[in-house]
Image (tube, rainbow, N blue to C red):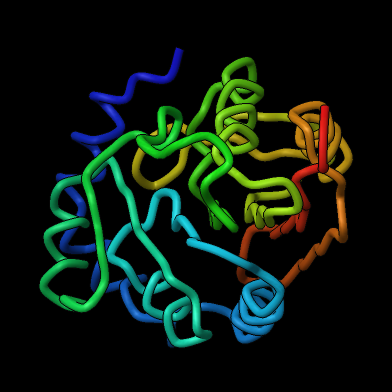
């Protein structure tokens, strides 16, 4: 089981360093910004930035015209997001148990926010995403890509890499149609993957 207390404590301890390193949208890859912007343009309804961190992607989504809400397990990140982007809504919470009505969201951005979940727990997280999304709602997942499901020692706490096909299959099983997948390998960075999916109309 994922130790959420340890996850929160580990990120809290490094929150200031994390904000300095990753808390600006300018620190993100241009291809990722293009992908998120294109995805956001097709959404209808409120978008949840699940694991919003310092809030940079929430603000980016808002600038694309989305009604966005951010949620994160780490209080320091939420405090930073609230003070930096006071026009947006941020809450401390666990996105594996989302406090919204079934079928009420238009989209969920899960950008590198499921990487710390144990593989056997991911189906439950994805099922929760499916529960809260309206039929036809959008999901965009960013993750570390690999040929096999494998743990590695992340800077903060243990994380997992996933093959795109294996993660796509879990997303399908949760009630989604895969729209497109993306991969990127660069010399100075871990391999990156992204999956765009749509909530099916009925189960």
Quadrant in the rendering for residue 18: bottom left
Q: Where is residue 82 drawn, in percent x and y?
A: 16, 67
Does residue 26 appear in the picture of this structure?
Answer: yes
Quadrant in the rendering for residue 107: bottom right
Answer left or right for 89 relative to 44.
left
Q: Residue at x 63, y 50 (%)?
A: 143
- Number of marks in the image? 0
Answer left or right for 76 relative to 71.
left
Q: Does 172 appear above or below 133?
A: above
Answer left or right for 72 relative to 47.
left
Q: Nearer the viewer, residue 84 or 42?
A: 42
Q: Residue at x 65, y 50 (%)?
A: 144
Q: Does 64 appear above or below 135?
A: below
Answer left or right for 33 relative to 31.
left
Does residue 152 appear in the picture of this structure?
Answer: no
Q: Where is residue 69 drawn, in percent x and y?
A: 36, 60
Q: Residue at x 63, y 55 (%)?
A: 142
Q: Where is residue 86 drawn, in percent x and y?
A: 16, 76
Q: Where is residue 75 drawn, in percent x and y?
A: 15, 47
Image quadrant occupied by the N terminus: top left
Image quadrant occupied by the C terminus: top right
Q: Residue at x 75, y 45 (%)?
A: 199
């Amino acid at each position: 089981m994922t130790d959420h207390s340890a996850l929160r404590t580990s990120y809290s301890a490094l929150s200031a360093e994390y904000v300095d390193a990753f808390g600006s949208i300018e620190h993100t890859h241009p291809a990722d910004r293009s992908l998120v912007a294109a995805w956001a343009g097709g959404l209808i309804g409120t978008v949840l930035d699940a694991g919003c961190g310092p809030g940079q992607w929430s603000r980016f989504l808002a600038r694309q015209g989305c009604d966005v809400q951010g949620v994160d397990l780490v209080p320091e990140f939420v405090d930073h997001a609230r003070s930096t982007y006071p026009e947006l809504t941020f809450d401390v919470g666990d996105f594996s148990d989302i406090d919204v009505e079934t079928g009420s969201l238009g989209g969920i951005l899960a950008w590198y926010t499921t990487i710390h979940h144990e593989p056997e727990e991911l189906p439950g997280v994805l099922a929760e995403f499916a529960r809260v999304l309206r039929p036809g709602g959008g999901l965009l997942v960013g993750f570390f890509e690999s040929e096999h499901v494998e743990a590695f020692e992340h800077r903060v706490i243990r994380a997992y890499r996933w093959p795109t096909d294996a993660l796509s299959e879990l997303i399908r099983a949760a009630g989604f149609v895969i729209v497109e997948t993306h991969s990127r390998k660069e010399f100075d960075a871990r391999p990156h993957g992204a999956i765009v999916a749509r909530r099916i109309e009925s189960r």
